[in-house]
């Protein structure tokens, strides 16, 4: 397979992950502070960022990198809260 095919697959998987996360939140199947929700956002944003950077859609790349940073910081916060509750 060519690089373009791999990048397109990453983009599609990223799209599916982000839309799945959004739909699960909207349907109240997940909470915003759940690890699953944040992992879907993180994985989705990575796939989309790679795809948009490859195709030089830089405004979308920036949005997805910011989305990745938000999901990463949320996961760190979730882990810290979990660690604090273990110590209590």
Image (tube, rainbow, N blue to C red):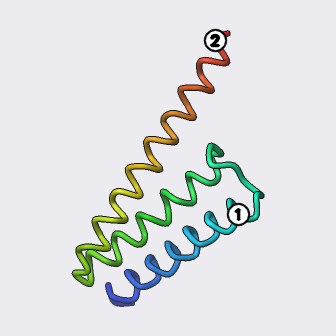
Local packing at callout 1 (Cα closer than 10 Å; few below 14, some 14-19, many 20+) is some
Q: Quadrant of residue 58?
A: bottom left
Q: On the rendered image, what quadrant is the C terminus found in?
A: top right
SS label for mark 1:
helix
Badge 1 or badge 2: first in the primary sequence: 1
Residue 24: numbered disc: 1
Against 44, is 83 above or below?
above
What percent of the width, then of the height, locates residue 72?
44, 46
For image coordinates 34% across by 65% down, the residue present is 63
Residue 43: numbered disc: none
What percent of the width, then of the height, locates residue 40?
57, 60
Cα distance, mark 1 to mark 2? Answer: 31 Å
Q: Quadrant of residue 66?
A: bottom left
- Labels 1 and 2 touching (C-beta < 8 A): no
Against 70, is 87 above or below?
above
Local packing at callout 2 (Cα closer than 10 Å; few below 14, some 14-19, many 20+) is few
Question: Which residue, given by chain and number where applicable, does mark 2 sit on?
Answer: 87
For image coordinates 32% across by 77% down, the residue present is 52
């Amino acid at each position: 397979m060519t690089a373009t095919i791999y990048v397109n697959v990453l983009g599609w998987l990223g799209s599916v992950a982000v839309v799945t996360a959004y739909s699960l939140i909207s349907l109240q199947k997940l909470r915003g502070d759940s690890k699953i929700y944040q992992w879907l956002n993180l994985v989705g944003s990575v796939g989309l960022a790679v795809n948009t950077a490859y195709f030089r859609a830089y405004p979308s790349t920036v949005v997805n990198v910011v989305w990745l940073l938000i999901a990463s910081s949320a996961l760190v916060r979730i882990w810290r809260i979990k660690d604090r509750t273990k110590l209590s």
